[in-house]
Amino acid sequence: MKTQRRLIWQLYPSYIVLVLCAVLAVSWFATDFMRSFYLEQLRKTLRYHGQVLYAHIADNLTPIDPQGLDRACKAAALQIPVRFTIVLPDGVVVADSDHNPEKMENHGNRPEIRQALEGDIGHAQRYSTTLQEKMMYVAAPVSVEDQFLAVLRTALPVTTIDESLKAIYMQMALAGLVIAVLAAGVGLYVSRRIS
């Protein structure tokens, strides 16, 4: 009987550790994949909204009309819950859907703006001191006839994604716990049978 008990406690803990490691690994990969997927979808959405806004501001770009651009950004934000910002090549903000651009600091040092100034689509995630929340930014260069005119930036809070994912993570954790408990029961039964 002692040998039987000793054998059970040699088999059972290693089985439990194996099951827990498998559940944790699958959960980690699944949550990482979901977060990446959601963030990529958010980037695509922001790029699309930037293209939509561009169609409405094209007439205000040559020459640059700050008042017209600002009006267009604010009007677009009433229809779409996205923050729009237009930044000149020197980093000066000429239009913003949420704030008075004249009171905003130079944006030339923002990572997504720097990328756009180099001719690429810029992406960044960071805490916005203006809006007091974590945001995702997508910035695109705006050119007319090969002349670089401005950067059009769109932004949305990442907090909405984090809240959605938190609910999914809780469901996955609960499912993982149920699987671990069931596996522990099966493991104990199998260990007893083997011993």
Image (cartoon, rainbow, N blue to C red):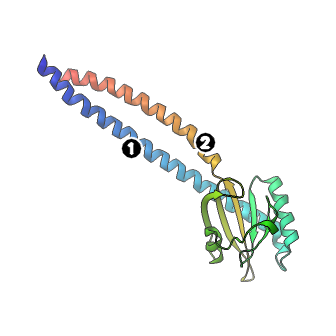
Q: Amino acid at mark 1?
A: Ala
Q: Quadrant of the N terminus?
A: top left
Residue at which label 1 appears: 25
Q: Residue at x 80, y 56 (%)?
A: 77
The residue positioned 25% from the left and 31% from the top of the image is 13
Count neighbours of disc 2 (C-alpha within 10 A) and say few if under 14, some if 14 to 19, many if 20 or more: few
On screen, residue 149 above or below 22: below
Three-letter residue code for mark 2: Ser
Report the label total: 2
In-image side of 64 versus 189 (left or right): right
Percent x, y for residue 194? 18, 24
**In the image, which disc is placed on residue 153?**
none
Q: Secondary structure at mark 1?
A: helix
* Mark found first going from the N terminus, 2 or 1: 1
Q: Which residue is mark 2?
A: 164
- Residue 62: horizontal and vertical position, in percent? 83, 79
